[in-house]
Image (cartoon, rainbow, N blue to C red):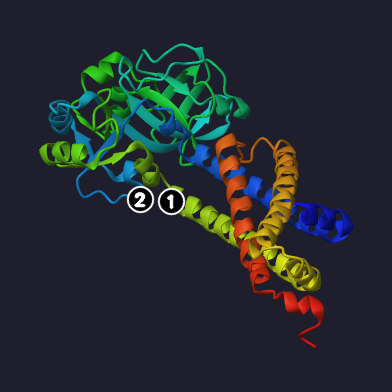
Amino acid sequence: MFLALRELAFARGRFSLMGLVIGLIAILMVLLSGLSSGLVNDGVSGLKSLPVSAFAFDEGTKTDNAFSRSVVDTDQLAAWRGQPDVAEAELMGTSIMNAVTDDGQQVDLTMFGVEPDGFLAPEPADGDALDGPAGIVVSESLRGEGIDLGTVITLDRINTELEVVGFTEGQATFGHVDIAYLPLATWQLIAAGQAPDGAAPTDAHLAALDFDQASVIALQGAEGSELAAGSAEAFAAGDAAATTTTLSLEESFNASPGYQAETMTLSMIQVFLYAIGALVVGAFFTVWTIQRGHELAVLRAMGASAGYLLRDGLAQASILLVSFTALGVAAGVGLGSLMPEGMPFALEAQPIAVASALTILLGLVGAAVAVLRVTRIEPISALGGNR
């Protein structure tokens, strides 16, 4: 480390400039991680919050936007409830609708139809739980659009009125649209085209309904079971009995609108950012190694091994990468906290930690490739034997 520390102090201008580049890469990495996490939360936070192991879609449903395409019924539900690893199974309806509040404010809602007394029913952080046929529990983020407890929402085109009775804890969205949880029977009334025009649904409307279909079957595996672990083998038996196609909770994220395209795009940007970081660090240490070739040859002539010089160079790169990556992460977190509220941006410790580790690791790989040239330096070079 003696040579590495002396060079860092002597050529602090060049190393500071290189560190600035590393810091800027780290800032971009933090901002991309925050944007990626924010888009995931904005796209599927409603699904992530559900106590679900898997979703069963109708067999043959295309996986992209499958929640809107799939149609299942009570016979398929009964088949799944008969499977040994299933602790809970319920129908769930999903649809995206336009609506207007009683004060004329237009809103978009993802309607999640769930059993009010089932395991999917949300626990409201404010207000009441689902109960009557016209009550809905909505995402906390809708407060920013002027919606409060008691607000009456009229669904577009069918003019059915629903009343906000509660708010979820935190954001609950699907496909970048805020979720409104409503009783499954009310969702089926709307899906069947029998919802009242210009009025709120009543118990009498639900009693007259003859409609047993929904969008998907939500499954909760028994504790410690293969279904709870997301095993494809556990899904296969139930799918064969119910003629469904089952995806684990995380796999079902790709069935939400736009999720796969967004995450793949951001992942590709991050991959290129890591590659650029490794190339930049490698190029810097290649030039730096060439410039100090004579000094390294002198050390070789004095008895220093190639391994010593390699360790010294990597230690130098480690100090540079760790210190300036840390500064860049701190700056990125500071900038991220200033992001406007409406932007889908979320700073989460795990993605940032993983991205930081990859930035340092790939930077070290780039530096190692460059510093390996010291193993080819011959002591005779220090004595002018190459002239």
Give the numbered dot on residue 168: none
Q: Callout 2, which amino acid?
A: Asp
Pinpoint residue 236: horizontal percent, then vertical percent: 17, 41
- Packing grade of label 2 (10 A; few <14, some 14-19, many >=20) is some
Pinpoint residue 350: horizontal percent, then vertical percent: 55, 37
The residue pinned by badge 1 equals 260
Q: Is residue 342 above or below residue 168?
A: below
Task: Answer with the quarter of the image where residue 158 lies.
Answer: top left
Name the residue rendered at 21%, 38% in the picture.
235
Contact flag, marks 1 and 2 (Cβ < 8 Å): yes
Of the image marks 1 and 2, the number of the one nearer the N terminus:
2
Q: Residue furthest bottom?
A: 387
Q: Is residue 15 above or below residue 205?
A: below
- Packing grade of label 1 (10 A; few <14, some 14-19, many >=20) is some
Mark 1 element type: helix
The residue pinned by badge 2 equals 64
Mark 2 element type: loop
Left or right: where does residue 244 sit relative to residue 229? left
Q: Is residue 215 visible?
A: no
Pinpoint residue 302: horizontal percent, then vertical percent: 77, 66
Q: Nearer the viewer, residue 362 or 291?
A: 291
Q: Nearer the viewer, residue 85 or 187?
A: 85
Task: Answer with the quarter of the image where residue 253 lies.
Answer: top left
Q: Callout 1, which amino acid?
A: Gln
Q: Nearer the viewer, residue 81 or 167?
A: 81
Q: Is residue 122 visible?
A: yes
Q: Residue furthest front?
A: 303
Q: Is residue 347 above or below residue 50?
A: below
Name the residue rendered at 59%, 52% in the picture.
361
Left or right: where does residue 163 sit relative to residue 352? left
Name the residue rendered at 67%, 65% in the picture.
371
What is the quadrant of the C terminus in the image? bottom right
